[in-house]
Image (cartoon, rainbow, N blue to C red):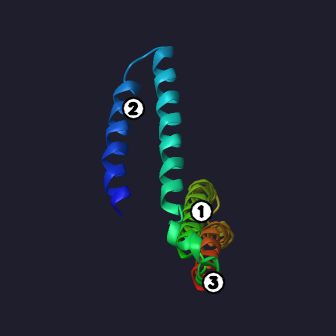
Amino acid sequence: MIVWLIALPVVAVVLAIGRGLLRRSGHTTLRWVLATNSLLLTGAGALLTVALDHHPAQAAAPAVAAAQGSGSAALIGAAISVAGASIGAAIAVAYTGAAAVAAISERPELFGRAMVIVGLAEGIAIYGLVVAIILIGKS
């Protein structure tokens, strides 16, 4: 928990600096943004390594650790599955919803078909939720 309390202000400062750099023009801005992205990626990897790092007490008793399972890894996996599926569903609904509105404005009888397509796009988020529930149930 303390790692998040330290990391969140650092991320906010880096994002504020990146936003300021984006207001500049030229190739130097692109270089700075790429450097900032690589710095954030490295920091996120370090943070994930620290969060998933096992303590020496767990290494001394591998049978107990194997019996308990890795609850934090399952929770991180569940969060990633929900986040990825939600972002994918949002992108899909944005495109299909815009196309559905355009089609309905020209031919109102296509309302049923258009809503089915938009509903299928929303189903992607449900798949991520199902995967998260399975992962949490296994931990």
Residue 112, position as x, y percentages in the image: 65, 73
Quadrant for the N terminus in the image: bottom left
Question: Which is nearer the eye, 34 or 121?
Answer: 34
Q: CA distance from mark 3 to mark 1?
A: 25 Å
Question: Which is nearer the eye, 112 or 15?
Answer: 15
Q: Earlier in the sequence, mark 1 or mark 2?
A: 2
In this picture, is 36 found above or below 93?
above
Mark 2 = which residue?
A: 18
Count the labels in the image: 3
In this picture, is 123 found above or below 86?
below
The residue depicted at 37 percent of the width and 37 percent of the height is 14
The residue depicted at 57 percent of the width and 80 percent of the height is 136
Mark 3 = which residue?
A: 138
For disc 2, the neighbor class at 10 Å (few under 14, some 14 to 19, many from 20) is some
- SS label for mark 3: helix
For disc 3, the neighbor class at 10 Å (few under 14, some 14 to 19, many from 20) is few
Residue type at mark 1: give it.
Ala
For disc 1, the neighbor class at 10 Å (few under 14, some 14 to 19, many from 20) is many
